[in-house]
Amino acid sequence: MTATPYLWRFFRAGGFDQVRLDTAADLLALDQLDQKLWVALSCPTSGIEFDARTLALIDTDGDGHIRAAELIAAVQWAATRLKDNTVLARQLPGVPQAAIGDDALAEAARQQLIDLGKDGADALLTVEEAGEAETRCRARLQAAWESGGNAAQALGSDTATAHAATEAVRAKIDDYFARCRLAAFDNRAADALNADADTFRALAGGTLQAGSEAVAALPLARIDANRPLPLGESLNPAWVEPMAAFAEHAVRPLLGRRSELTLAQWNELQDKLAPYAAWLAANPADTADAAPELATARDLERLARYVRDLLPLANNFVAFRDFYTRQAKATFQVGTLYLDGRSAELCVAVSDPAKHAALAGLSRMCLVYCDCVRKGENGPEKKAIAAAFTAGDSDQLMAGRNGVFYDRQGRDWDATITRIVDHPISLRQAFWSPYKRLARLVAEQLQKVAANKAAGVESKLAEAAANAGKKIEAPKPVAQQAFDVGKFAGIFAAIGLAVGAVGTALASVVTGLLGLHWWQMPLALAGLMLAVSGPAMVVAAFKLRARNLGPLLDANGWAINTRARINIPFGTALTGLAQLPAGAFSNVGALADPYADKPFPWGRIVFLLALIGGAVFAWWKLVP
C-alpha cells in the first residue's frame, strides 16, 4: 500500500515558492520534500549568526558545511529521543523533562534538574543547563574515583612514587627474567642472549657514555639460567639509577631490603601494586570518551540544542522565511552598517573580499566592502563585511569613507570602505544620472578652462618677473599684412551658419511650444525629460529586477538552490534613508544657521518665465 504523501504548504516571496515550516510535522517530513524545492542545499558553519555549538553538532563529518542530509539526520535523531515531538516547533529555550522519551536521557535530565533545584514533572532544562550536565557528570565520576583510591594505595601517599619507579623499569625487568627462563630451557641460549664480542667491539670504536641508547639496549644484567636480578652491583650502567630508585621506593617498602630479586618476588611486588594500577587506569579524566554517563550527558545537551534550534535553522536553510518576511534577521545577516546617511541591513561576513567580489558582483547589487575594527577584551579585533546598498544613490560612496557597523550582539565597529562593486541602486538615481553626468562634464570642462587660463596668467607673470630689470629693446616694426578678404569672408560665413543653426533650432522649439495649448506645455517638458532619462531608467529597471541574493551567498560558501530575487520595494526596505521624525521642526529659533546658503528664488523665476511666456504667447496670437 502506497504511503500518503505529506501535504505541504508554500508561500511565495522573492519571486519563487518557499515551503512553510510551522509545525513539528513539517520538520519530520523534510526527508519527503523534493530537494529541488529547498532554497539552500548547503550552508557554512562559520560566518553566520547562529549558535556555533549547535552547528558543530549537526555537522557530523566536520567539514565546515551543513548539508541537507545532515539537517534531516539531526531532525530524525531528535525525534527518536522525544515522546512529544511538538516541542520542536514551540521555540523553547531547552527541552522539557516530560518530553524526553529516552530512559537514559530522561534520568540524566532528572538528575541535572535535581542538582539545579528544579525538580518537577514540568521542569525545563535549558541549553545552558544541559551544557553543564557533562561538567557535573565529570565531577561526580571524579569524586567517586578519588574516594576509591585509599583502599588501592598499599603504601599510602608513597604508593604513587613506588608505582612510578616500578613502571620506569618494568619492561626491562620483564625482559631480564624472560631471557633467564629461556637460558634455563636450553643452556646453549645463554651465550646468544647475552651481548656477543662483536657488539662490544662496535661499542668500543666510539666515545662511550653510560646512558647512551646502545648501552641501554643491552640486557639489564648477565643472563644465566634462573639467575635472580641483582639490585646493586653488576647492572647495566645505563639502568643503575632507575634500578636504584626502584629498589629504594618499591622493593624496600614492599618486600624489605634486598640485594637481589627473584622472579617470584618480582611477581609478588607487581601483585601488591596491581590495585593501585587498576585504580589509576580507571581515572575518568583518561577514559572520558568511553564513559557511558558522559556520552549520555553530551546527548542531553545535543537534544536541548536541537529542540531550540532546528526549526529556526530550517527556516533559514530550507526556506528563507526570516529574510523575506522580515520577522527576524536571517542567519547570514551579520549586522547593520550606518554610512552616508543610510543604514544597510543586508551585510554578510567576508573572509577574502577580492575573491568574494568576483562572484558576488553577479548579484547585480551595489556592494560596499568594509574593514571593521574594534578594541576587544583581548586586544584589537578585525573583520570584513560586504554591505548591499539598495536605496538612495552612490554619489558619495567611495573608498576610504568611514562609518559604523553594529553586529548582532550590539557591539559597534569602526568601518572603512575598501572597495565598491558598482551597480544601479534605485530608479531615482537612474532618473537623475544623465543630468548629473552632464553637470559633472560641464563643471570639469569649466575647471579645465579656468585652470588653463590661470596657468597661462601665472606663466606670463613669471616671465615678466624674470625679465624685470633687463634692458627693453624697441620691438622691430612688424610688416603690415595685406587684408585677406576671402579669408575673413569664410570666417564670417561659418559664424553666421552656426548662429543661424542654433537660432533655427531654438525657434523651432519655441514655435513648437507656443503652438501647444497651455496644458500641453508641461506634458511636453515631461516628455523631454523622459526622453533624456528614460533609457537610463529602463536599463536600471532591468538591472534592479535582476538583483539576486544567490551569488552574494554562494561567494560565502552557501549552495543556493534557487533564484532568490530582491525586487525594488524589498530592496528599498533593506536600506533605510535618513528622515526627520514625524512632527519634528528644522532650522527654527535661536539655532537657525546664520551662514546657510540663501535659497534660490525658484518662485520668482517661475513667475517671471510664466509672465514672459504669457506675453510672448499673447503677442504671437494678437499680432498679425
Image (cartoon, rainbow, N blue to C red):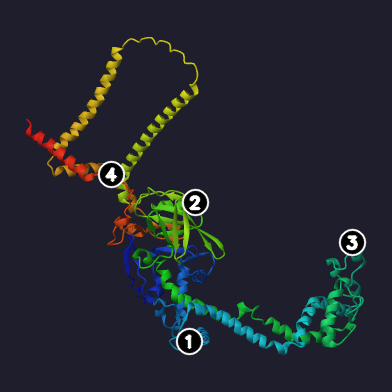
Question: Gap between marks 1 and 4, in whole Å?
Answer: 69 Å
Looking at the picture, how far across and down is residue 506, in whole percent? 21, 32
Q: Name the residue under label 3.
A: 207
**Badge 2: few (under 14), some or many (20 or more) residues near its Cα, within 10 Å?**
few
Task: Give the residue type at disc 1.
Answer: Lys
Left or right: 376 with respect to 255?
Answer: left
Question: Which residue corresponds to mark 1?
Answer: 118
Q: Distance between the residues labelled 2 and 4?
A: 34 Å
- With respect to residue 466, does 41 lie above or below? below
- Tell me which amino acid carries mark 3: Thr
The answer to which of marks 1 and 4 sits earlier in the sequence is 1
**Residue annotated with mark 2:** 354
Residue drawn 40% across and 10% down? Answer: 477
The residue furthest bottom is 151
Residue 103 location (% of width, % of height): 50, 86
Helix or strand or loop: what does disc 3 sit on? Answer: loop
Mark yes or no: residue 174 visible.
yes
- Single out the mark in the foreground, 2 or 4: 4
The amino acid on which the numbered mark 2 sits, given as a three-letter code, is: Ala
